[in-house]
Amino acid sequence: IDHRIAVPVGVTLDRYIMHNQNAFSFATGELSQLLRDIALAGKIINREINRAGLIDITGGFGTDNIQGEAQQKLDVIANIRFIRALINGGEVCGIISEEEDEIIYTGNNQSKYVVAIDPLDGSSNIDVNVSIGTIFSIYRRVSPLGEKPTPEDFLQGGDKQVAAGYILYGSSTILVYTTGNGVAGFTYDFSLGEFILSHNNIRSPLDGKIFSYNEGNYNSYDSFVREYLIECRKRNYSARYIGSLVGDFHRNLLKGGIYLYPPTHKDPKGKLRLLYECFPLAMIAEQAGAKASNGFQRILEVEPEFLHQRAPLYIGSETMVNELMNLI
Ligand code: P6P
């Protein structure tokens, strides 16, 4: 059966995962439990975000992360919550996080998964009530069971992800993920404390009329990017840019559109991180019939060399990404 049709909308994330588990090879239950652990942390972060202004956890924390970005209090809280949930869940032997310089060893060396995570992306929007998101990527480890994970566990390449997803803390809170068999979305129901299936088998429109980029960087873009943007304006496409990748990505995934973060003078290799922003969103995009490129190749084929590597990102509707790539 095609499980993506047989599951009625309204089912909880738990039941959907169990249904999926029975239908697919990862019936051992570890990946199912790992997805539940991530969903639990998402519920906790969601609660913190929704009361941030009330309990003085907005604003800067006074420290910088490896990216040299001032950490927001909620950034740090989200990082701690996800790490704790993954350690306690027991299914993960190692974690890399945007907020941490090095690999986090959970001590669960018998576990067979590693997670790369951006605990709270778009954090500059936290204090002004604009959507923010969590992005996660899951790999089966390649290092020996029983030992500590190694960087190679995280540098396997985008096509080796076993699952990827995001949680968008927006007008509603939605968890979207794929395990390589289509994309499903679950909207958080506060009254039940459950993520409920609301988007069964997301398919992204092949074309779109929305383009998302930071206009302020226009003059530093390569000529092919500027040429594409001029064409979008000629066609009276809508320019929509939240400044929060998960929000822009999710809107474009559902409505059709393209998000561009090209190399700039400030970020000549691109700003977004390959392992916990580009790869997971690219897996979701492709699973939903969309595309993701770094301007030269399918971004899932980029060979990662180090954990916090950056990359240019052009992601969204297939026709729009193809048109842009044809201009190179
Ligand atoms: P800029 C947020 O810091 C982020 O990583 C993405 O969420 C967002 O799309 C982008 O950077 C915004 O960057 O340079 O336009 O402010």
Image (tube, rainbow, N blue to C red):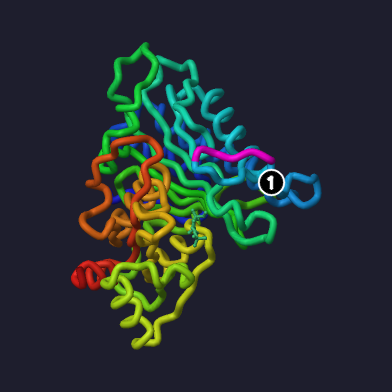
Compare residues 192 and 274 and report the one nearer the observer.
Answer: 274
| x and y, in percent, of residue 293 in the image | 27, 57
Look at mark 1 in the image and give the residue it sits on.
Answer: 60
Q: Which residue is farthest front?
A: 265
Q: Main secondary structure of the magenta part?
A: strand
Identified at 28% across, 72% down, the residue is: 223
Magenta span includes 156: no
Is label 1 within 8 A of ligand 1 (CB to nearest ligand atom)? no
Give the residues drawn in magenta, as a range. Answer: 62-66
Identified at 37% across, 47% down, the residue is: 310
Compare residues 165 and 246 and report the one nearer the observer.
Answer: 246
Compare residues 13 and 223 and report the one nearer the observer.
Answer: 223
The answer to which quarter of the image holds residue 64 is top right
Magenta span includes 63: yes
Identified at 38% across, 71% down, the residue is: 257
Q: Please give left or right for residue 13 compared with residue 114 in the image.
A: right
| x and y, in percent, of residue 90 in the image | 49, 22
Residue 33 in view in this figure: no
For mark 1, does the 10 Å Cα neighbourhood hold few (<14), some (14 to 19), or many (20 or more) residues? some
| x and y, in percent, of residue 41 in the image | 58, 37
Q: Which residue is farthest top?
A: 146
| x and y, in percent, of residue 134 in the image | 52, 47
Compare residues 38 and 195 and report the one nearer the observer.
Answer: 38
